[in-house]
Amino acid sequence: MDRNKNSALAKILDTHLSTLAKTEGLEQELILAAIDAGTMVCLANPNHQNLTPLLVGQPAKIKVNANIGTSPLSSCLETELEKLKVALEAGADTVMDLSTAGDLDQIRQKMLAVCPKPVGTVPIYSVGQKLLDHNREISSMTADELLSEIENQCQQGVDFITVHCGLTKHGATLAKNNRTLGIVSRGGSMLARWMLENDQENPLLTHFDRLLEICRPYNVTLSLGDGLRPGAGCDAGDNAQWDEVLKLDELCQYAQSQGVQCMIEGPGHMSLDLVYGQIQTIKTVTHHAPLYVLGPLVCDSSPGYDHISGAIGGAIGVQAGVDFLCYLTPAEHLTLPDINDVKQGVMASRIAGHIGEVALRRPHALEREKRMNAARRDLNWEEMKQAALDPGQVELRRREHKNEEVCAMCGKFCSVKMLKDLREK
Amino acid sequence: MDRNKNSALAKILDTHLSTLAKTEGLEQELILAAIDAGTMVCLANPNHQNLTPLLVGQPAKIKVNANIGTSPLSSCLETELEKLKVALEAGADTVMDLSTAGDLDQIRQKMLAVCPKPVGTVPIYSVGQKLLDHNREISSMTADELLSEIENQCQQGVDFITVHCGLTKHGATLAKNNRTLGIVSRGGSMLARWMLENDQENPLLTHFDRLLEICRPYNVTLSLGDGLRPGAGCDAGDNAQWDEVLKLDELCQYAQSQGVQCMIEGPGHMSLDLVYGQIQTIKTVTHHAPLYVLGPLVCDSSPGYDHISGAIGGAIGVQAGVDFLCYLTPAEHLTLPDINDVKQGVMASRIAGHIGEVALRRPHALEREKRMNAARRDLNWEEMKQAALDPGQVELRRREHKNEEVCAMCGKFCSVKMLKDLREK
């Protein structure tokens, strides 16, 4: 990525590089080299007040995103702000406001105002909502409408945007004709419909230079969306999917040459045996740009528990090179997540990230494991709580028996206690 | 396994083989050959009334076990019977009664009476409890006491028992001296203490022939316990662990030659990168005897969410050869599971098993996925419910919006709906 062309980013790094290096436990030179190589991005729009910039891209720590936002069937600003709070408390590194109902500008501004971590959006949702409000078909959208909404969100302070620039007419046709579940990305669907009905190429692709001009002054990172991610295991890894990945790489390389940071978005549904190969291939094809993945969701039949299936795919994904995990909640495929779902989703993704990092032997992850195991050996419950990914759960679960040295599962038969007694004899 | 020496098993197969073949979707000849080869076991004690026998060992379907039972800090028969019911409703294939408090004979008999699926136990727990009741140290236990308790449980109808026969004085010493968390198996700890304090070899090893004589008439399957399973990622894969695995193979081969069925129990804590290699190695060393695994738990720092970490390890484990998953619940490492934990634990293990089977392309698993995806394509919510691993969750989550064709996440922006409308135009 050509840093000389992005003065907004240069300023942010001037101010924050030393803190970022400390937070990540990485050398400043390594971070700058990775940003230059396009394998790491710094999420930070100068217009986002009180933001702490964030690095995404291994060997920076794995990051977790929580999707929140209103929907036509469930729209309440206060609830979404509460979800934002819960997501941050649970340890989300970013949130995406995917609202599609209510006063979208107001919701976005409120979220940006209270969120000290990067906020992402999918700008085409807002355009879609405006069209619907005026009873206009998606096919009537103009490129100007889409680009001016993107500019509006950049000015508001959004740090990264999902733009499905790599979705081509050819790819959309392949997906529509050859798949069980076609196109399951909402933004991708809208663009596919626009292209097929107008018989024109994707406006985000044909106007890619204008998109870069709009984003650069705000250092808004493009999250190059996977509009053709498979929505069913049986659709995984087909021509349509790879057609888009190849295009995303081209666009990513070009954007970087123009001083705009990019991440690549990844699948999606796929069976467990495909995860390692697909992630490695996507990373290689896209020159190791930061990979932002939804799941991967390694089975289709676990509605109500997709946060678990997603964590299974996510952990392997991280081991294979994923940098950024988008959470799935227990509500996925069924309804909008509630407050508790948000918490469960963030935790499941954080666990997947941690497990992947332990497998990769990242020092900060091993340090946490070491601390936990020393605490377990000593039956030191306060220390276990501190080492846990969710200290609150340790507190809660221990409440009833908090004065016991052992836990209520084994009681007197606690093997750790037996060994401790033997050691202390 | 020498079937000619086990008339109890022969009778069970005479009666149930055709049903078992149907249930598993396997040829009868394949099942018999696998039982003979010792790569599959049929869990069924003729004294267990109303039992439906169960096959364990791929390519039979992956099975899931739920551990229930009282503990010194939480002892209520009714609650445990309720957990049994919930475990079965959630789809557990077996339960193990790990009670260590209350009237253990009564608890076991009640569970056997109401459980139509195989029931397992760890008989040394009962011996340990009796010793404690009489203020006797574990070191004062006699081999006769242990073997007569095993015989008692065989007579009662227990279908499989965990016996830590492969734990040697040498292995226990290695684990005690070289590990962060030593021995975390409760039964293993008790035996290790017995051996080290008496300076004698494991009574289950020195009296292995008597153990076989006791179990054979009841076709009680030995679940050869991994007393030295690592209790921390940093202890995984050490000499102590492998010393026991090698011994378990010897004992397994010998038991099979004497007409007694065996499973091998496996780890335990290990990082994700080790799962595939360890499982493959254990399976190879033990001549592909059915492998019954706790987890593997692929991180130490997720108390409150160990069912998720266990499912991550379990899914990879199944892909690598695991046959039988013992659940972990959200309560693991913290307290005894409650009713909801039991449900969550069974579901997480079933999801792991299903994901592993999809990766292995098992026909019944792919069939479920196919049905779900067809239902999703058609927005047929009733059919999605039927295809789901937990139909109840689909019902529950949809309740508020059950008359909507789409779900409350995307509403009007439903990509599947857009495609469906396009198809139906």
Image (tube, coloured by chain):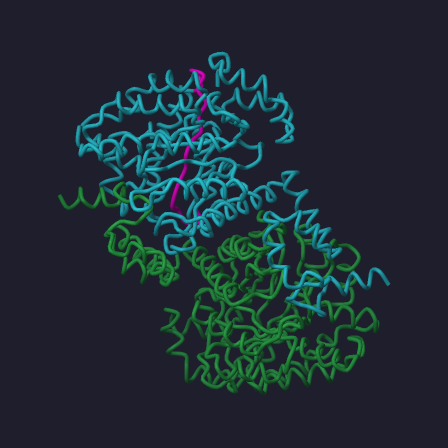
Chain colours: A green, B cyan
Q: What is the quadrant of the C terminus of chain A in the image?
A: top left
What is the x, y in percent for residue A406? 26, 49
> Whole-percent x and y of residue A332?
60, 60
Q: Is residue A379 shown left or right of residue A63?
A: left
Residue A256 in view, yes or no: no
Q: Is residue B415 above or below residue A45?
A: above
Whether residue B258 appears in magenta in the rendering, the answer is yes
With A338 as the anchor, is A403 left or right in this view? Answer: left
For residue B350, what is the image quadrant? top right
Q: Nearer the viewer, residue A226 or B132?
A: B132
Name the quarter where the N terminus of chain A is drawn: bottom right
Which span of residues is magenta-colored?
B256-274
Q: What residue lies at 34% left-to-right and 43% top-to-bottom? A: B75
Tell me if residue A180 comes above or below residue B361 in the rendering. Answer: below
Is residue B305 visible in this depiction of the protein? Answer: yes
Query: Foreground residue, B388 or B276?
Result: B388
Depth check: A411 or A366 in front? Answer: A411
Find the residue positioned furthest to the left: A425
- Say left or right for A2 vs B216: right
- Residue B305, percent from left and from top: 43, 55
Q: For residue B169: magenta?
A: no
Q: Residue at x 42, y 47 (%)?
A: B297
